[in-house]
Amino acid sequence: MAEKIAKVGVKREEGYLYYIDKNGDVSRAKMARGGKKGGKPTKVAKAGVKKEKGYLYFLDKNGDVSRAKMARKVKKAASKAKSKGKSKKR
């Protein structure tokens, strides 16, 4: 289902949210708890992953960058609106 993109081996710490940033590197930010605001993001590791459209990029349980195909529903074409005239009652 998911494929490994880059071996980074990031060791996670509790209380932080780990994610793949715009540049394709691993970053983390302090999680907001109990009304307190979260912290500013800091770069943890340089992975340099080139992101492709239609994939979800994440840090797997081994601390490596992986991706999975996003299951998106195909939108149907908009149906024509029903006639706006008032219906006749008998």
Image (cartoon, rainbow, N blue to C red):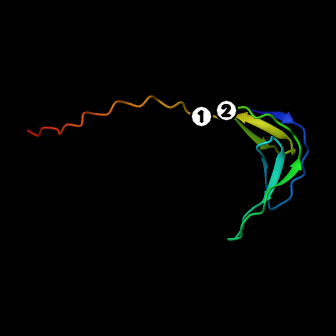
What amino acid is found at the position of numbered circle 1 in the picture? Arg
Residue extending farthest to the bottom is 35
Q: Which mark is residue 27?
A: none
Q: Judging from the image, what secondary structure is the residue with disc 2 in? A: loop
Observer-nearest of 62 and 25: 25
Give residue 50's quadrant in the image.
top right
Q: Position of residue 86 (x, y in %)?
A: 17, 39
Residue 27 location in percent, x, y? 82, 50
Total count of labels: 2
Q: Few, some or many C-alpha atoms within 10 Å of disc 2 (few <14, some 14-19, many ≥20)?
A: few
For the point 90% across and 38% down, the residue is 7
Q: Which residue occupies 82% across, 36% down? A: 49
Dots 1 and 2: beta carbons under 8 Å? Answer: yes
Marks 1/2: CA distance? 8 Å
| Left or right, 39 with reference to 72 | right
Q: Determine the residue located farthest toward the front in the rendered image.
A: 23
Look at the picture and state if 32 lies above or below 51. below
Per the rendering, the mark at residue 54 is 2
Question: Residue 81 location in percent, x, y?
Answer: 32, 33
Residue at 59% across, 34% down: 72
Please tell me which residue lies in front, 41 or 90.
Answer: 41
Q: Where is residue 56 in the image (x, y as percent from the top left)?
A: 71, 38
**Which numbered dot is residue 72?**
1
Amino acid marked by disc 2: Gly
Quarter of the image with the C terminus is top left
